[in-house]
Image (cartoon, rainbow, N blue to C red):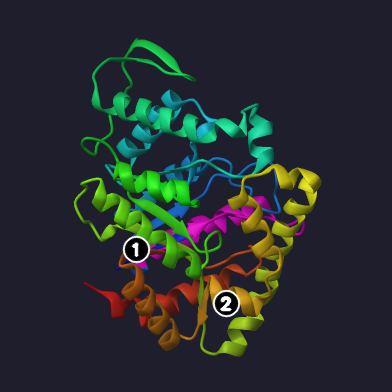
Amino acid sequence: MKFGLHYQLPCTGSQSPVQRYRDTLDQAIHAETLGFESVWPVEQHFNPELSILPSPLLLLSALAERTQTLRLGIAIILLPLSHPIRIAEEIATLDVLSNGRVEFGIGRGSLPNHFSGFGVDQAESRERMMEALAMIRQAWTQDRFSFQGQFFQVEDISVVPRPVQHPHPPIRVAANSTETFELMGRLGYPIFVASQVNPFAKMREYIPLYRETRTAAGHPADEGEDVTLLGPLYVGPSQSQIRQELEPSVRRFLESVAAIAAAQGSGLEKQPRRVREAFERVRSMTYEKVSEVMAIFETPDACVERLKQLEEEFHMGRFVCWFNPGGMVPHAQVMRSMELFAAEVMPHFAE
């Protein structure tokens, strides 16, 4: 099993955005030396308590010049918010800069203020995402092309540069709802499953549904590469030290989600059921509950055991570790946890 890093990059008023970015770059660069395979930042907007990372491709292009083998993943680009031609150009450029190390991760998004901020109707998010994806694939695989869709139209253009990877960088889609698990299974796309959105119990329902739909549609079995799990993870020498280092940051994460839900007011009831359920689930969490149902906060031996249980259940090929949910764990402690994980957990999953 491969291991990656996830970054959302919340930044409180007492933290420096410059330092948060520098720490993130240092961690990701160090991760390559430790044997981590990939890094996966996520696009977010308009709320520093949640994230100051609106442009993950800029972060990844900085990493491209300071790493050699690290796969540069995006988990995720909010595809309905952008013009697909611009995304096709930028991803292809990053693939050239990194000599073919890009992993193209996309999703619909779920926060209403993202859509209102960009003047996009959230009710159109699925249709916009799928149309944009179709357009991007054509841009990467045809010398010149035209496209006439519901939302986007182009006539006889050529997108340059072309990606280094042929026919294009690997595509992976964030799956959060029953409909998306089924749709991606039917289309044969690999998926992300994030435990902070769908806890492990939900994954036991959704991942088999995805694979059953995938098989029924005639796509070859590809267990491992088809599913990537992403979730909060932290290792330390003892449970007491883990909790001491991590609990304030986890509380901060829970508080930021609760604040987003509160800001929606009655408008939350207008959101899709999956969004309402995710908000309510996280709002009611405690540190203990987070650790039980959606995270791995363990000593190395216990971390190995829990990861092996997940691997046996879900047959995922990659686990993307979110070492600092909430963003409050000091940089040096994040680095120590990464080092302990690499030294005492990762060798148990070496191929």
Q: What label does residue 125 carry, if any?
A: none
188 is within the stretch colored magenta: no
Q: Residue 106 appears at what percent x and percent y?
A: 44, 42
Residue 207 visible in image: yes
- Residue hosting label 1: 318
Q: Quadrant of residue 319?
A: bottom left
201 to the left or right of 9: left
Q: In front here: 248 or 259? A: 259
Q: Is residue 12 magenta?
A: yes
Write down the quadrant of residue 302 in the picture. Answer: bottom left
| Amino acid type, residue under disc 2 in the picture | Ser
At a point 68% along the width and 55% down the height, the residue shown is 11
The 10 Å Cα crowd at callout 2, few under 14, some 14 to 19, many 20 or more, is some
The residue tagged 2 is 291
The stretch of residues the image draws in magenta is 6-33
Q: Nearest the camera: 184 or 350?
A: 184
